[in-house]
Amino acid sequence: MIRQSTTVLDWLKYASTSLKSVNIKSSQLDAELILQDTLSVAKTFLRAHPEYIIPEYFLPILNARLSLRVDHVPIAYILKYKEFYGRKFKVTPATLIPRPESEDIINAIKILNKDTVSKSAIDIGTGSGILGITTSLECPNIKVDLSDISPEALNIASINASNLKAKVNINKPFSLLSETNKKFDYIIANLPYVDKSWQDTSPDLRHEPALALYADKSGLELIFKLIKQSPSHLNRDGLIFLEADPIQHDAIIKYANQYSFTKILQINYCLVIRLKSK
């Protein structure tokens, strides 16, 4: 632990080495993020002033935050925010941390939402609200409901909606589509899809809510339940935007075909299926 007369360069070297020793690949970046956030300075300041002596009263905070990261607490939980689609979202251990691959869902929505006619959407398992809020802000013609089984997650989503001035409707907590009678043009869902048997998961995951990560039946239980419930909650030619590992897409498409859905688009982790017209 570093004490007194510590320069920016000294602390970054110490922190980066500590993080590298526990196999954190983003050791340098994480050290910089912790330091710039704690000091409330830009990254350019750190690089322009490596000789700057860190005020002593910051050191306990820095060392405590570094200890959390050494224990593989995700950097987003330490900083209490994560950027998604160019916006800053509040996150807590009650919510899953936004992943870059989730941006493909927003890209798919923008591709398929080609006109300005009013549409409706529900973001199932919204967590911190990233997908529903971003959809509302990127596509103003879409009226978005946010839904989650977790009251804590919905509270964070509500804070993010307020901070980002997104006009979305926050539902009471419920599972999937079980307690809504509404119909929508779009269903957006980043549901738990990680199979507990997968061996290549990061140790950081143990700090994220298991409820938002893991599902039975090879990770597909909740996705299958949603597909089964969806036909009665979608308007004509309605779409479901799903996030899942690409290795799961074929199984999802095969299952969805039983409920009159057909695949229309795949972008990396994003899979879009359409309810066939009768």
Image: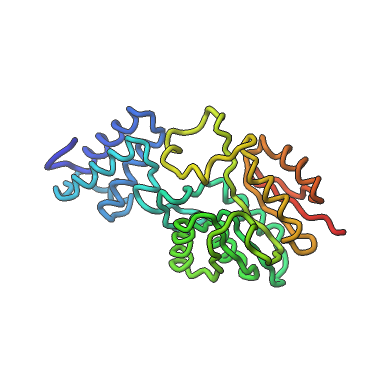
Q: Is residue 247 above or below residue 83?
A: above
Q: Position of residue 114 (x, y in %)?
A: 72, 64
In this rendering, position of residue 50 left or right of residue 236: left
Which quadrant of the figure contains the N terminus?
top left
**Residue at the far right in the pictured view:** 278
**Residue at the far left in the pictured view:** 4
The residue nearer to you, when weighing 31 against 237, is 237
Which quadrant of the figure contains the C terminus?
bottom right
The residue located at (57%, 58%) in the rendering is 174
Q: Position of residue 200 (x, y in %)?
A: 52, 29
The residue nearer to you, when weighing 194 against 104, is 194
The colour scheme used here is rainbow
The residue located at (16%, 41%) in the rendering is 6
Q: Is residue 116 above or below residue 76?
A: below
Q: Is residue 90 above or below residue 96?
A: below
Q: Is residue 22 above or below residue 211?
A: above
The residue located at (66%, 38%) in the rendering is 246
The residue nearer to you, when weighing 211 against 162, is 211
The residue located at (45%, 38%) in the rendering is 205
In this rendering, position of residue 260 left or right of residue 200: right
Q: Position of residue 259 (x, y in %)?
A: 79, 49
Q: Quadrant of residue 234?
A: bottom right
The residue nearer to you, when weighing 255 against 248, is 255
